Each structure stands twice: as C-alpha cells, then as structure tokens.
Image (spheres, grey):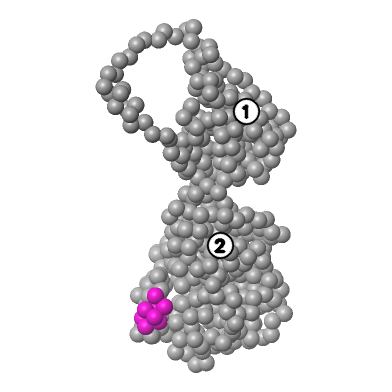
Amino acid sequence: MKSLGRHILVEFHGCSAEILNDVPRIEHDMLEAATRSGATIINSVFHHFSPFGVSGVIVIQESHLAIHTWPEYRYAAVDLFTCGDSVNPWVSYESLKTAFEAEHGSAIELNRGQLELLEKINIDLGDMRDQATQKLMPPKQSRSVWFTDKDDNIALSIRHKGDRLFQEKSPYQLVEIYDTFKYGKMLTVDKMVMCSEKDETAYHEMIIHVPMLAHATATPGLKKALVIGGGDGGSVREILRHPQVESVTMVEIDEVVVRASRKFLPSLSSSLDDPKLNLIIGDGINYLEDAQDESFDFIVVDSSDPVGPSVGLFSAEFYKNVHRVLTPHGVIAAQSESPRFNQAAFVDLTGCLQNIFGPENIHTYLAFIQTYPTGMWSFTYGTKNGIHPVDALDPAGATEFTKKHDLQYYNPDVHRAAFCLPTFIQNLLAR
C-alpha cells in the first residue's frame, strides 16, 4: 500500500429523482454500500435538505461515506474515503450506482497521505496504550435518521429508527408509517405528519370532545355522526366514547390509510370494527353531495392539509353541503390548519365557514400538537342554532367524562382556554 487512505469523489447523473428524495432509502443504500465494501459501520446521520434532496454521512471505522442529492437534477455527489487496505471503495461506488438507478457515473480517486511524502515517528504511550488496548470493544452501530415536515420557510424534524414499517403509494397519495424514538409509530401522508401514537390524543380529543361536550346537555343530542377522512380511526374512537351516539359513518377516500392504521396503529384504529360504525371507502365530497338534507347531527372534517385529494375539503361548495346535511341542532368540527404554518389556508377556511354559517356561529379554537410544524393547530366549531361552545359547557359533566375515559389532553379548563386566541390570530381573523 502506497498511501494511508483512498478517497473517491463520485458524481451520479440521471438517477431516480424519487429515490434521491427518500431519506430512509438513501440511508439504506449507503449502509448497504458500506457493508458490501467490507467497512465496519459506526454511525449514520441522514436528513432532508430544503427544499429537495438528502444529506447524510455513514461513519465507518475506516473513515466515512458522505452524500448530498439534488433530485430536481437527478444528480448525487458522493464522497467515499477509506483508510488502510481492508475496504474497497469501488465496491461502494458500483453498489450506489445500481441503487440510485444512475444512467451515468464518474469518479476520481485520490491517494491520501502518500507514504513516500511522510515520515513516521515512534510514539510510546507506555501503560496508557496497554490499558486502552485492554478496554477496546467492538464498535456499536448507531443511526440518526430524520423525517422532516416542511415548507419553504419552516421545518419540523423527527428522529426515527431508520426503516419504514409501511410504505405504499395509493392512487391518491404516498402513505408511510415510521417508528420514531420520541413519539412511537407515526403516520405520514405525502411526507406530512398525520398523527403519532404519543401525541395523537391532543388532536382527536379536541376535535371531538369540544363540540360534543358543549352539546352534551342539549336536546335533542348528537346521535348520528359523520366523519369525512379520519382513516386512522382516532376520531371514531373518541366519538364512540359518548353513549348517546347511535351511529357513525366514516367516509375515507384512501383504503391504504385504513389498512396501514389497522395493522400498525391499533391504539387509534381499535374502533374501526365497532358495530355502530359504517365505514365507507369513497370520496367524502361526493358522499355529501348525495346525502339527504339534515341527516347528521355531528359532522367532523378530519382531513389532511389542502393538497392532493383533500383540496376539495377546503372549498365553499363542500361546506355548503355540510351546512345542508347538518340537522338544525347539529354541530360541525373541522381541522382548520396552523395559523402559522398554513396561515393562508387557516384564514380562507375560517372566512368561508363564516360566510356559510354566519360569523356568530363560527368559533376558532386551538390545541398544541408537538409533531405538527410550529406545534400550534386550529380547529373550527360551527352550528346552525347558535349554541356557544364555552357558554354551553357543563364543567361538572365534562370533568366526570374526562376522568371516566382517562383523557390525556382534554379537560374543562383546556376546553375553555382553547377559545382564548392570541392577539395575532384575532387580528388575522378580523381582516
């Protein structure tokens, strides 16, 4: 051997853009390349780069493999550096070229630390060296792989265990489930966080129990419920805690979301087999267009963000049908986006609902959901009959309900406080 290390600078062209934007896939391929070359893996760190691409590094006992990708150009730059002669970096090169489906690859090898230019000295560490040698242990591999929910200006990253539990591209969207370190299993749709096991209660308890407990003493009660979306099952689970409910209809457009949730998120999906539930795999917009007037007491719009199949769930036409289908004593609850992350959608949806239901019948309230960008999320409560969501609350009954069902986020104090909006939100809605 004529050098201390081999350094290969690599460029891959004409790669699969989808692969180059997939963090777990890139990490897997880099780990595989390192393993095939004979390297000993120590650590891996990978994350999304804004707005597209993946950056990451595999630390090996013999040095490192690093990468940055540009999916929009179908291009990846890779750095392969190995010390000694036990690892062949060209094996990694060939492995990655195949994995990335590259049309063309180019590389240049540099010899680092050419021995004829170096002078070796003797270092005697004495007992310290002997003690250190006795304590040497095989390296333990660790992984640091991150899922990032982002727009052009704000991002939230959550560390997961590296390998996806579930991935399937349906006719509507990409559905994935990750196993995270902090929040348990996490459902994502088109690279956006939908829910996680550890903090989903904030979302589902607030979207359901705020309207239902505000109407708990009203006559007649909320007996027939309709959920648009909500394929993870969390909203249905919370609705069915209320004994007066006679039936729930859930219309979810994507059966893949339901199937993935049934298998990997049983704590959310446990009520999807309840005999009171009529589960329909179909388009909620079309369902409402065909529904009879005043046929549901409670309508929940548990949608994802206003992209892809959910765009129509943020339109005036959709909410006019919601108003028509709602009984005179009924109530609607909708997730209405983040006042910070999706400010335009939040303001537009609130204005749309005010125009249809009347400003006096529409009330915005907040919950704080750690796995959503900015943490602050909004819901909208609406009625035809003017029942106020705070004034109508029976605190004693709500307290009893909270304790009986061991709710983790909702309680009567949170219920009341949720409608106390920060000044910047008040100003947004007053425009």
Q: Classify mark 1: helix, strand or loop.
A: helix
Please identify the residue farthest to the bottom as the structure is shown.
Answer: 219
Q: Is residue 393 visible?
A: yes
Front one among 238 and 264: 264
Is 24 on the left or on the right of 365, as rendered? Answer: right
Mark 2 belongs to which amino acid?
Phe
For mark 2, give the secondary structure. helix
- The residue shown at (58%, 61%) is 305
Q: Quadrant of residue 55?
A: top right
Q: Is residue 403 magenta?
A: yes
Among the 4 quarters of the image, the one containing residue 285 = bottom right
The image shows residue 399, relative to residue 20, as above or below, that is below
Q: In this view of the protein, which residue sits in the foreground, 251 or 117?
A: 117
User: Residue 385: which disc?
Assistant: none
The reply to whether residue 349 is visible in this rendering is: no
Among all residues in the image, which is located at the extreme front?
134
Mark 2–mark 1 contact, CB under 8 Å?
no
Residue 177 position, x and y percent, is 56, 57
In the figure, 159 relative to 398: above or below? above
Kindly identify the amino acid type of the residue bearing the numbered disc 1. Val
User: On the image, numbered disc 2 is attached to which residue?
Assistant: 264
Would you say 259 lies left or right of 377 here? right
Please report the bounds of the magenta region as a residue range.
399-406
In front here: 62 or 308? Answer: 62
Mark positioned earlier in the residue sequence (2 or 1): 1
Q: Which residue is mark 1?
A: 91
Quadrant housing residue 327: bottom right
Give the camera-side residue of 376 and 372.
372
Give the Cα distance between marks 2 and 1: 37 Å
Magenta stretch containing residue 154, yes or no?
no
Numbered label tally? 2
